[in-house]
Image: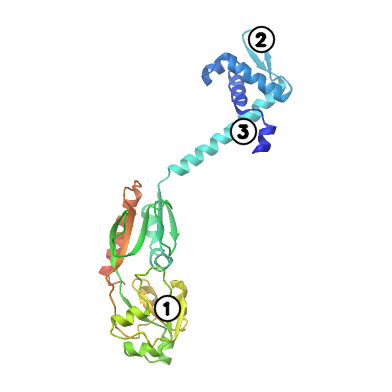
Amino acid sequence: MKGLRTKLPPPNSILAFEAAARHQSFTRAARELNVTQTAVSRQIKTLEDHLGLAVFRRARRAVQLTSEGKRLHEAVMAGLDHIAEIIAELQKTRARPHLTVATTVAFSSFWLIRRIPDFRARFPEIELRIITSDADLDLLAEEIDVAVKYGNGKWPGLSATRLFAAEVFPVCSASLLDAIPIHTPADLLKAPLLELEALDTSWLDWADWLREVGLSAKRLRRLLTFNNLPLLMQAAVDGQGVALGWTPYVTELLARGKLVRPIETVVRPSNAYYLVRPLGSENPNSAIFSDWISEQATSLEEAGFG
């Protein structure tokens, strides 16, 4: 930018020149720019001193562009017109309905992304931006309109709409189940277990799950730990161990036969999934998304997480 300042005349002199050239009059240019005729004359003088040549021929009641002035005026008009077009495009883009949605990697990968085509088909005018992060994001600081969180529904500064509860149960590949018979929860203590290193402390791990079904986790030895649920699920599909399956994340994998349930034992945490919004949010599209995702969640629960 410093280089441009040394090459270009002062911006005010260019604006004064454009108005004077268009009106062929310093007086009318001054009226348009809401300055005095003397001020316009002074800006033109500054421009000509910078160029080292005259851009106007002065007459008693009018001014005319010199040949050099005509060339400059064409360049100035082309540049200003282009700037005006870009500004209009940017303003138009900003004016479009938009919505920023934040979810965890798992929720987006296993549940939300399959339903986004329905939202886009029903609300094509809304530009959707999806952020995936397992960290606890500051919605206001990150300019996030809505987010999906797992917990008790009570977060300071956020309004929460319950979507659905969760069920947690063991899942594995059919090939692993053939190699390692699992008939009771106690049999899991002898199986290779896939663990998730979750940032969310409310997320159940194997120790929590086993404790809920009345077993001690002290004998756990064969753990393979991941910090990414999609990767952990792929390891389960590949037969590397038994994972804790969360509805609705594993619903499709079970339906397609990629995973099976070795036992029917289920733990139902007291927490649930919620759609949250910053209190005082002014984006009207937040309500549209809230109604849509609540409808999707209701359909899911009515189908038994199918």
Measured as percent of width and height from the top left, residue 111 is found at 38, 67
* Above or below for 266 versus 151: below
Mark 2: which secondary structure? loop
Residue appearing at x 39%, y 54% in the figure:
139
Amino acid at the residue labelled 1:
Glu
On the question of residue 169 being in view, the answer is no
Q: Position of residue 3 (x, y in %)?
A: 68, 37
Q: Which quadrant holds the N terminus?
A: top right
Distance CA(mark 1)–CA(mark 3): 60 Å
Quarter of the image where one finds residue 306: bottom left
Q: Which numbered disc covers residue 195? A: 1
- The amino acid pointed to by label 2 is Ala
Residue 16 at least partly seen:
yes
In this rendering, which labeled residue sits more in front, label 1 or label 3? 1
Q: Is disc 3 placed on a helix, strand or loop?
A: helix
Looking at the picture, does residue 30 appear above or below residue 228? Answer: above
The image quarter in which residue 134 lies: bottom left
SS assignment at label 1 = strand
What separation in Å lies between label 1 and label 2 (alpha carbons)?
87 Å
Position of residue 103 relative to residue 237, above or below, is: above
Q: Where is residue 74, by image quadrant? A: top right
Q: Which residue is mark 3?
A: 79
Q: Which residue is pictured at 30% across the width and 71% down the height?
A: 166
Q: What's the CA distance linking mark 3 and mark 2?
A: 28 Å
Residue 109 in the image, given as x and y percentages of width and height: 43, 67
Considering every residue shown, the one lying at the far front of the view is 218
Marks 1 & 2, CB-CB < 8 Å contact: no
Give the labeled residue for mark 2: 59
Q: Earlier in the sequence, mark 1 or mark 3?
A: 3
Q: Residue at x 46, y 78 (%)?
A: 225
CB-based contact (under 8 Å), mark 3 and mark 2: no
How many residues crowd mark 2 within 10 Å: few (<14), some (14–19), many (20+)?
Answer: few
